[in-house]
Structures are given as C-alpha cells and as structure tokens.
Image (cartoon, rainbow, N blue to C red):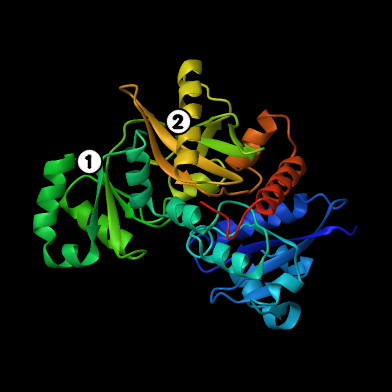
Amino acid sequence: MGKIRVGIIFGGMSSEKEVSLNSGRNVYDNLDREKYEGIPVFMDDKGGLWILPWQLVSQNTTIDISEQLDGAARRISYEGLKDEIDFAFISLHGKYGDDGCIQGLLELQGIPYTGPGVLASALGMDKHIQQKILKAHGIGVPESTVVREEEWRQNGKDVEKRLIDSFGIPFVTKPTREGSSIGVTIVRDSSSLEQGMTEALKWDTAVLVEEYLDGTEFSCIILEENGKPLPLALTEIHPQSEFYTYDDKYMPGRCRKFTPPKNIPADVVEHIKKEAVRAFKALGFKSYGRIDGFVLKDGRVLITDPNSSSGMAPSSFFFEQAACAGMLPSMMISRLIETSLQIHSEKKGPLEG
C-alpha cells in the first residue's frame, strides 16, 4: 500500500489565518514521511483551495502566499479535493474552519478529518450556546448574557445599566464566535463599554458579556483513544497583559506557561482534568480538543472556552503537553491521524457530534 496522502488545510478566511499558517506549517514539517505524504492545501481569503509547493508554505504571512498563488500554486475545486488527498488534517482556525463549515465540505466529499463533526465544531465556536450546554450538564461556567447588535444600537443606555446592575464593574465583552482573544475587552467604565461593544461587533452581530474572573487560567488538551477521552498534562497560564491577549498567545516572551502547573495544587489539577473531560463529552467533541478555564481565588473551577481543535505552532499547548507525556511532535500528529481514521471508519453517515 502507498502512503496516506494527508492534506494539511490552513490559511482561510478568518481573523486567525496567520495562526493557522503557523499551525499548518508545523504540522507539515513534523509529518512522519515514512507513513504519510504531506499535501499543503491553502485556503485563500475567498475560500478558494490551492495545492502549494514548499516554497510557498515557508512564506512569512498568508498575504505573502496569496500574492504568489497564480504563478506558483495549483488551484483545485472543492469537488476535486478528494482526488488530491485521502485524509484532511484541519489546521484552519476560527470561522469557516473550527465552526463546522469545512467539516461539512469534507463530509460531502467522503474525506476523513481531524476533530469532531459539523455540530460539535459549531458548538465549539459559539461561546453562548456552549455555555448553555455545559451549564445544563452541571459544569461550572462564567455568568453571562448576550447583547445583540440591534439592541445595543437602539437602547445602549438601558443595556449599560442592565449590564452594570447584573455584573458590577469590571466585566468582559467579546464576540460570540471568535478565537485567539480577538475582540475581547475588560470593561471598567462607560467609555470602555462603548469601546468593548464596538470592538466585539466588528467580528459578530452579537456580543457575549461575562463576569470578570479573578484567578489563574489553565488549558488542557484532551485526546480520544479507543473511544475514551484522555487529558494530557495541564498548562498554567500567566499572561503579561491584564488578560490573555492575542499578543500574549503568539508573541515570544509575552506569557509564562507552566506544564505541568506550578501553583495549582495537585488535587485541583485532577479535578480540572475531570471537568475538562466532562466538557469534552458534553459538547460531543471527537478525536481531540482543548478545554480552557479558570481556577478562581475562591476555589471554583470554571470552563470558559472549550475548543474543538487546537493551535499547533511549535510552542503551542498541544505540543507542550505532548512533550510532558514523552511524545515528540511527529508522534503526536501520527497518533491524531490514526485515531481520526479509526473514528471515521466506524461512523454511519456524517460524523456525529
């Protein structure tokens, strides 16, 4: 048998396309060439798919790649994707990548892929709906409400009063469907509320308003093995900024991360892992996921951001926690591909969850 053709899909149309480029490039570089043939599949900012040569994969930004597509890459159709790859390693992040859109396309083409199916991917992107589901399962989540764009435009003062009465000051505003802390603001007065709502509404038509959390942030990678979700080592996060911003996540030296945790007690770590697994199951995640949250100063553990996928840059939580388990990046990627292939071989119809 020949090697499995693994299409690493990256780039895309979301605010996280540069993060996606770093993830896709790292997956491509660490793919086990004895088992797999890596096919770099770039999604441009209009959703078009391109097969890239290595010279373009190594470019610094998605704009650098896009400017050279016509001369150096090969455009393919959606329906032609199944002729190019046997398996899709989804390295897209954000809208159209984490939210069920690309998963639906792959289901229609009969191509197995990493991560959960359409529904669970959509849930992993929608912070409002996922909180409702987690709360229904008895899992701790922040107190929150949603403000629609129309309501804010028409009744801003009434909304402001309601939010301050409900949450006090400070509280947090964010788009309901974004990642990488894009559009997040800590609201401390009327002026910053206006700023926070404006920033969040650049990215979505609804704003999630949450209580401000005073505590230590964590992240836990969950891997599925033989149908059972297994948590890896927890990562404790200490950002340089007042919250875990985009720059803290991706700029070198902007954040301290401890894997395993340095300050979270061992018994709390075990409790967090159990809650992370419960969240993984409640949302129907498959293959793998990343569950983020806070340990508050009063001892509560809250799940704040369940993700149906994870960034895969060299310094990501994914590979830090894999290293703690004694796995090299290539080993982790191979394991994820093998697990995903097994999951898809057992499905009936589109992947559930």
Q: Quadrant of the N terminus?
A: bottom right
Label 1 amino acid?
Answer: Pro
* 320 or 192, nearer to the observer: 320
Q: Which mark is residue 275?
A: 2
Looking at the image, can residue 237 be seen? no
In the rendering, at what x and y percent does residue 182 appear?
A: 41, 55
- Across the whole image, how many numbered discs are drawn on residues? 2
- Relative placement, left or right, of 318 versus 120 is right
- Determine whether, in the image, residue 327 is placed left or right of residue 146: right
Q: Earlier in the sequence, mark 1 or mark 2?
A: 1
Mark 2 surroundings within 10 Å by alpha-carbon count, few (fewer than 14), some (14 through 19), many (20 or more): many
Q: In front here: 158 or 84?
A: 84
| Left or right for 47, reference 136 | right
Query: Could you say which is closer to the camera, residue 323 or residue 248?
Result: 323
Which residue has dot 1 on it?
A: 170
Residue plotted at (30% across, 38% down): 142
What's the amino acid at mark 2?
Glu
Give the label, 1 or 2, closer to the camera.
Answer: 2
- The residue at 52%/46% (across/down) is 285
Q: CA distance from mark 1 to mark 2?
A: 27 Å
